[in-house]
Image: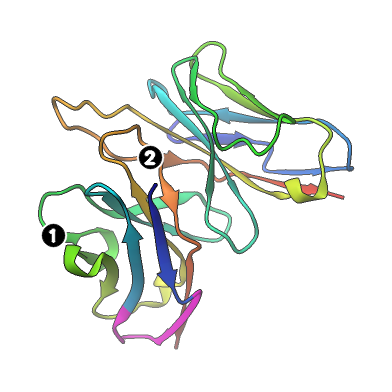
Amino acid sequence: GAGVSQSPRYKVAKRGQDVALRCDPISGHVSLFWYQQALGQGPEFLTYFQNEAQLDKSGLPSDRFFAERPEGSVSTLKIQRTQQEDSAVYLCASSIPRDRVLATNEKLFFGSGTQLSVL
Amino acid sequence: AQSVTQLGSHVSVSEGALVLLRCNYSSSVPPYLFWYVQYPNQGLQLLLKYTSAATLVKGINGFEAEFKKSETSFHLTKPSAHMSDAAEYFCAVRDPFGNEKLTFGTGTRLTIIP
């Protein structure tokens, strides 16, 4: 596709349910990021993949959050036993990693996000 | 650790007036700095970026920002506001020696008064 695609666009879950959020990055993009954006706040980093390798998961708020990218393209963010504080917009972004020699491409492309509401 | 602070969560300007959105950064190394815009129900869109070249950076839609090391600032300006500029604006910082991970500010909602 032309851009980063995320699904579903909206998700309502009862507290305690598990949810799975999907991200389709731009074809050929090696780097993939997940961010969490609470209402009225800026996006906060969750985790980073380079191809299928999860190189940084320091932003995941608890062990209920799990992300994977098994084939280096589509990624899934899973939240187990959802809590009300998990309600937020979850943003996915992708890019070609910066080539330090060629100094190319500093741009992240963001999807429209999945708005998760936990009742 | 790196961070950005955006002064003013809400800014209102009249159509045709100067737009000034403030961003100050904190970084232990010379940072890369970005401004993103978010329209309702849309993804974040890059307006402009500073990556240690020219300190005055021009972006899309007539926006520009100036990197001032002495003031640790990267304020976003536009000489004449248009109704279509109404949106949420985010300043962000990243480590130039790391991956593309961005640290965002809390955002400034810009309202344009007709």
Circles 2 and 1: CB distance less than 8 Å?
no
Residue located beneath label 1 in the image: B55
Observer-side mark, 2 or 1, equals 1
Q: Nearer the viewer, residue A36 or A20?
A: A36
Q: Residue furthest left?
A: B54
Relative image position of residue B59 (x, y in whole percent)? 24, 58
Q: Alpha-carbon neighbours of circle 2 within 10 Å: few (<14), some, or many (≥20)? A: many
- Is label 2 in a helix, a strand or a loop? loop
Question: Which residues are the magenta region?
Answer: B9-19
Q: Residue at x 89, y 37 (%)?
A: A16
Relative image position of residue B38 (x, y in whole percent)? 47, 58
Amino acid type for the residue under numbered disc 2 = Leu
Q: Alpha-carbon distance for marks 2 and 1?
A: 21 Å
Indicate which disc residue B108 carries.
Answer: none
Amino acid type for the residue under numbered disc 1 = Thr
Give the side of residue A26 with respect to residue B19, left or right.
Answer: right
Please tell me in which quadrant of the rendered image residue B63 appears: bottom left
Residue located beneath label 2 in the image: A108
Residue under disc 2 on the same chain as residue under disc 1: no
Magenta region includes residue B11: yes
